[in-house]
Image (tube, rainbow, N blue to C red):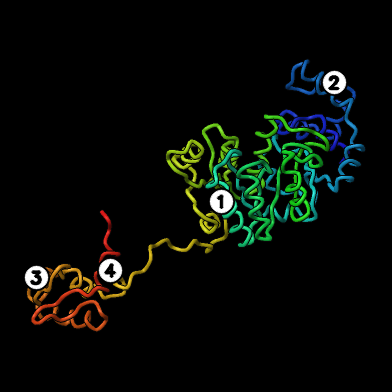
Amino acid sequence: MFGRVFLGRVLEPGDEFGGRWVREFGVGEVVRRLRAGREPLPGVSGVRWAGLVARAAQADPARDLAAAAAAGARFVRPGDAEWPGQLDDLGDARPVGLWVRGWPSLRMWALRSVAVVGARACTEYGTHVAATLAAGLAEQGWVVVSGGAYGVDGAAHRGALAAHGATVAVLACGVDRPYPRGHAALIDRIAEQGLVVGELPPGDHPTPSRFILRNRVIAALTRGTVVVEAAGRSGSLATARAAQRLGRFTMGVPGPVTSALSAGVHELLRGEATLVTDATEVVELVGDMGELAPPRRGPVLPRDLLAPAARSVLAALPGDRAAGAEEIALEARTTRDEAIARLYELRAVGYVERHGDGWKLTRQAMISVRSGRHPC
């Protein structure tokens, strides 16, 4: 454990050179060379090697473990019972380990999880959709994973918490130093009810590159990623692209075509992403066989319950006057006797009334017919 904690302080997240060193030489040998500083590891320049050696001189695994324990966090490494195996899909970019706050098992929670990410400066629409989507997923027993940021991330976490569900915040900084500061209370609440995860050691601060690299962990942990509002350069699109590279499901919630904050989502949907509008559609993709979303259909009108022949006769009646049975039969493309039989059926359910030798639509039928007709 001490070796991987040491490497987590020296290597940046997603360092594929470091991952290859660990794979080829083993943790112990990589640590030994970094501490000694005399035998450079292959693939890096002298300047970069000097920088790594300087960081190695400052690393103190015992201090990091003590700081984590004080914050109620633990270190989880590959091979531990709690390590999520799907992170191994990242190859040499796999984290050397993860710091975890919260009592649940990260591995068990990650087995049935979905990422919900999106714009920081989102609209009210984005906030509403993210919170509703996350609450729906939580109610169906899914773990909602996001980045703890302002906007869509925060709305997703709050939606899951409001539904008394499970949520995981993956941070781009030390798990003992919540970021953004305005979400300190939210992240503490997530740690109490769910999990707060990060690959940077205690006390480390976020940088723009660390946010982007953090997104690969979100994508790898989960079965799929849903993007709710994202401009063309949104960092959440990096999560979606990472999910696609890893063979995970990538989904997007559409917004107004006039909104720049939905332009990135729409571009995803023009590619390989799947359009979703609620939790049931997400679960249909990422869930088990048979977890299907209900079919979408408009409201059932009373006239929809009529037999096809009766609907044809009903549609044949003029709306502004009474008509004879022969005229109605001609318009309905049926016989006079068939039309009369259907007219009496329609009279029994209150759609037509007799006017001398003719038949006329009732007020109830006029309302039903108008409601059922397409406005165009």
> Would you name the residue on which mark 3 appears?
330
The residue that appears at 86% across and 26% down in the rendered structure is 56
> Would you name the residue on which mark 2 appears?
39
- Give the spatial CA distance, label 2 vs label 1: 55 Å
**Residue closer to the observer: 337 or 74:** 337
> Would you name the residue on which mark 1 appears?
128
**Residue closer to the observer: 60 or 129:** 129
Across and down, in percent, residue 351 comes to 24, 77
Characterize the local packing of mark 3: few (<14), some (14-19) or many (20 or more) Cα atoms within 10 angstroms: some
- Give the spatial CA distance, label 4 vs label 2: 86 Å
Q: Earlier in the sequence, mark 2 or mark 1?
A: 2
Element under disc 4: helix
Across and down, in percent, residue 43 comes to 73, 22
> Would you name the residue on which mark 4 appears?
367
- The residue mark sitting in front, 4 or 1, is 4
Quarter-of-image position of residue 205: top right
The residue under label 4 is which amino acid type? Ile
Characterize the local packing of mark 2: few (<14), some (14-19) or many (20 or more) Cα atoms within 10 angstroms: few
- The residue mark sitting in front, 2 or 1, is 1
